[in-house]
Image (spheres, helix red, strand yellow):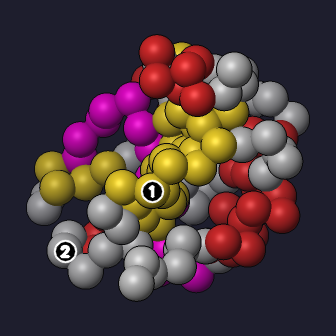
Amino acid sequence: MSKPMPFDFLLDYLPAKVVIKPAIGMYYIYFEGKIVLIFRKVGKNPQHNGIWIATRREDHASLKMEVPAVTDFQFGDEVFEPSWLQLKDDQEDFEEAAIAICERVTRRDKRIGKPTAKAAELTR
């Protein structure tokens, strides 16, 4: 029996046409030819649980300013700045911040989402 998707309440704040693909405790969220989010809730490395936001490095600062709970990825004491940001599921204002991110996806915020061949195939 598979585990339920984490943070499924957020589906109410995402566009109806998102495509969701599960992968070992992670749920990839695709929309209009882009990967936009990953929902993660896994026992291993729980510091990475929450929502991963596909974005470009040049958009990190503005997204973090608008949704202060969003952070860079951190490995130990080292901050790692991939093209993803993270909203940790243990943030005090997780639900509010997660809804804000999902609403930006729904509004087609250009700062969220990365085109990929797989995303284009899934969302045709």
Q: Please state which amino acid type lies under the numbered disc 2.
A: Lys
Q: Is residue 82 magenta?
A: yes
Residue 63: in sight, yes or no? no
Residue where numbered disc 2 is placed: 44
Residue 97 x %, y %:
68, 63
Residue range corresponding to the magenta coloring: 79-92
Task: Give the crowd class for mark 1: few <14, some 14-19, many >=20 residues within 10 Å.
Answer: some
| CA distance for labels 1 and 2 | 17 Å
Quadrant position of residue 113 = top right
Q: Is residue 114 left or right of residue 103?
A: left
53 over 61 or under it: above or below:
below
Quadrant containing the C terminus in the rendered view: top right
Residue where numbered disc 1 is placed: 22
Work out whether residue 76 or residue 32 is closer to the camera in this orientation and state it: 32
Determine the residue positioned at 30% across, 35% down: 81
Q: Please state which amino acid type lies under the numbered disc 1.
A: Pro
Q: Is residue 101 left or right of residue 23?
A: right
Residue 122 x %, y %:
58, 29
Disc 1 versus disc 2: nearer the observer: 1
